Amino acid sequence: MKTFYIETFGCQMNVHDSEKVIGTLVQRGYSRVEEPGDAELILYNTCSIRDKAEQKVFSRLQQFKKDAGKGKVFGVLGCVAQQEGEKIFERSPHVSLVCGSASYNKLGDLLVRIERGARRVTGLSLDTEDTFETEATRRDSPHKAYITIIEGCDKSCAYCVVPFTRGPERSRTSESIMREAHELAQMGYTEIQLLGQNVNSYLDPSAAGWNFATLLRYIARVEGLRRVRFTTSHPRDFGKDIVDAIDENPVLCNQVHLPVQAGSDSVLRAMQRLYTRDEYMRRIEWLKRSPREIALSTDIIVGFPGETEKDFRMTLDLMDEVEYDSMFSFKYSPRPNTSALQLSDALDENEKGRRLAILQEKQRMIQIRRNAGLIGRNEEVMVEGLNKATGQWIGRTAQNRTLNFTDAAGRAFEPGQYANVAVTRSGPNSLAGETVN
Ligand code: SAH
Ligand code: SF4
Ligand code: F3S
């Protein structure tokens, strides 16, 4: 029996790619093991988004080699594989397989070549119209499922590696997506998360020609689904029709992740984000006017080359205006191939760190305030498990907040079950409460 071990880094797209890769391997007679030492094939699905990702991959590969023992086959997948390509063989000669996400359809053939003794095989072409679809996907959770609806990215933000690592945008046909959604619902999944680097740029390549809002409307009608989420939305392609779809369909979660990146027009322009602050704020207004109380989250980069103190203040000011429910924030990190490498006026790491700390403290205060406003409400949660240390059940609300709860009657809950919880306490990152009947 052929055995494999896989380790995954990166965004939800990568996590779900690994679920599909695992399915592909299992279909070909491989079985998965939990320790690299027990595996014949060791796969590493990598992320390249920030912070010298390449170096980390090379040192992890070195570690694997030490831990795993002799006679193993090593493969690098994902964004660093695509970015570094054959250079990986030079720096890590024990690696035999390098394959980017745009070539996963060829993974089966590449494995056959390795099984026949090939020493170095690659899948590195980005020139593809294919999407990676398989019926063999091995999902981690029996309750919540990812569905990739669009791969790649056609934008060219000045700081970002994704267009180089995942290739051009390719949407799946609506028919294939709907088939997968129906199958998942029949298998008992109640929550689905639609994935794409720019999920809302979805455009059905088949004659039906659905746009993203139309797809959302149809998915929301799939019998058995209770929660549908989607990520990540690009502000430029975020139409009012998406808000209308959420307003009309309680199954579509009242939660939208809309990364702004920066609050000043000059930084947005330098980043090539393709929208102005005003255009972004118009979308926020649509969302805020929704009767559904849509939770908003964002990504922000501080310290982009040329970001002045005044620009930075405009980002803080935008945060006050929007009052996000949650935020991911990062120091700008220079990445290979990206056009921002050509920009002068780089900020030093200390200054980036100072700005990040100010931003994160501000967001903490906003979250404390917003979460406190939810005390006294009743929320439906999907149960995720039990926190043994605190004795609380862990739940997640439709707005994607963590709501930990206890049950006065001492009932036990199963992951995937839904419960109604009254919110009694709040903190910056979570809520706590008790079940209600
Ligand atoms: N497609 C999504 C973002 C995907 S990457 C979008 O356009 O919004 C996830 C986040 O990583 C980005 O939103 C950005 O905030 C951050 N990021 C990407 N490249 C970065 C870099 N070079 N330095 C710092 N943060 C970066
Ligand atoms: Fe990167 Fe911009 Fe594409 Fe998002 S839209 S993946 S930030 S290039
Ligand atoms: Fe990382 Fe690639 Fe996702 S760079 S964030 S794994 S698209």
Image: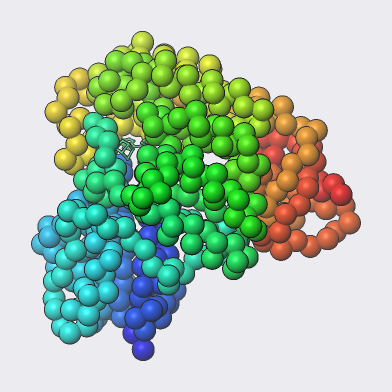
Q: Residue furthest right?
A: 409
Q: Residue furthest bottom?
A: 1
Residue 48 appears in the figure: no
Quadrant for the N terminus in the image: bottom left
* Left/right of residue 318 with respect to residue 25 in the rendered view: right
Q: Residue furthest top?
A: 310
* Left/right of residue 351 with respect to residue 165 in the rendered view: right
Which residue occupies the foreground of this view, 185 or 303?
Answer: 185
User: Please, is residue 211 above or below residue 221 in the view?
Assistant: above
Rendering colour mode: rainbow
- Residue at 56% across / 37% down in the picture? 245
Which residue occupies the foreground of this view, 182 or 43?
Answer: 182
- Residue at 38% across / 23% down in the picture? 262
User: Please, is residue 73 above or below residue 296 in the view?
Assistant: below
Q: How many marks?
A: 0
Q: Position of residue 105 (x, y in %)?
A: 28, 66
* Left/right of residue 185 with respect to residue 208 in the rendered view: right
Q: Quadrant of residue 95?
A: bottom left
Q: Position of residue 236 (x, y in %)?
A: 37, 28
Q: Position of residue 15 (x, y in %)?
A: 42, 57
- Residue at 24% across / 43% down in the picture? 163
User: Please, is residue 350 above or below residue 120 in the view?
Assistant: above
Residue 34 appears in the figure: yes
- Residue at 50% across / 32% down in the picture? 241
Which residue occupies the foreground of this view, 111 or 136?
Answer: 136
